[in-house]
Amino acid sequence: MTTIEFRQIEWDDEIVDDCRQLIRLAVREDLSRWHDWTTVALVPEGMRGAARVVARQSGVIAGLAAARIVLDEYDPRIEWQDLALDGTQVEPGRALAQLAGPARSLLTVERPLLNLLGHLSGIATLTRTYVDEVAGSPARVYDTRKTTPGWRRLEKYAVRCGGGMNHRLGLFDAVLIKDNHLAFCAALPGTTAVPAVPETGACLTPAQAVAKVREFLDDLEPNDPRSGLIVEVEVDTLEQLEQVLPAGPDIVLLDNMSPAELRVAVARRDATFPRVQLEASGGIELTTIGEVARTGVERISVGALTHSAKWFDVGLDWLQG
């Protein structure tokens, strides 16, 4: 089977720009255009300090690459030294980084820095638990677009730190035909181009929708970057799968199918159009993903990686003298 893949998030200029905009918002949230009055009142100006960022639990770290951006937006005078790397599996008490600089600035930057590390490391840690559950199977674990607005690149980066794979970054990144695309078409007044499908009321079947998308892409100039878009389509039944395979999708998303149905889907795909990859999605949990992986699907998408990850406990410990 030829492997096709969505763009995978790496630490690059785009993610740096996203991170910087988020940290500038964090500065505004904490300080408005004023100061940390608690620290100003208690800590004399000119004092320096040093501290370590320490893991309070076991898990996978993500977000250390963003730390320098956080410090730069709060006070560029703060010095930062990595003691671990993103993607590192750590145990409680492990020092992740050391920082030194003006004491007032260290106190002010503490919470936003730990917020970022706690959120992203929580995603990486949860992702690793899902990835471990599918070990030994042909399946890989993918994220979704169920991300915090503004945080998508960072959250998808954290999924990669945890060993997961990135699904499409945004609507611009691939074609994914879902049931609501078909349902909306049915609601258009005077739609007569295609007879309605009795069981759904939609005016396009998944197979017809794929054919329409392929026609759109084939009409593009060869050097048009859209011509290489991955085409994925969602189906709800095995009958829809059989109908859609000849239309030429790259990936078929099997929505809310049981393991038994997934095994049948894999067998039918293997017998007819083995180049098409299959993605299981919908209601997949840590307790069920292993069984889903053993059905033979190549992809499993899990929204919980980003929308339900528990905060990773990380703290800042002052160094003496």
Image (cartoon, helix red, strand yellow):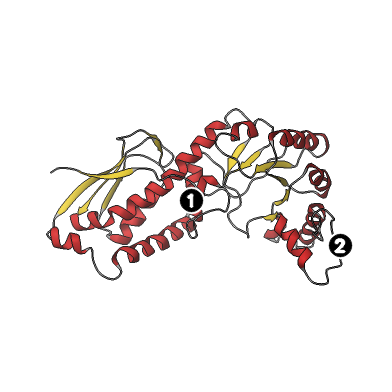
Pick the quarter of the image with the N terminus.
top right
Residue shown at 34% from the left, 66% from the top: 28
Q: Secondary structure at mark 1?
A: helix
**Where is residue 97 drawn, in percent x and y?**
30, 43
- Is 239 above or below relative to 40? above
- Is 186 above or below relative to 101? below
Question: Is 321 left or right of 316, judged from the image as shown?
Answer: left
Amino acid type, label 1? Glu
Question: Is 216 left or right of 37, judged from the image as shown?
Answer: right
**Where is residue 251 drawn, in percent x and y?**
71, 46
Give residue 184's mark: none
Measured Cα–Cα span from mark 1 to mark 2: 40 Å
Instruction: Name which of mark 1 and mark 2 comes first in the sequence.
Output: 1
Residue shown at 38% from the left, 64% from the top: 25
- The residue labelled by disc 2 is 194
Front residue of 14 and 152: 152
- The residue labelled by disc 1 is 155
Pick the quarter of the image with the C terminus.
top left
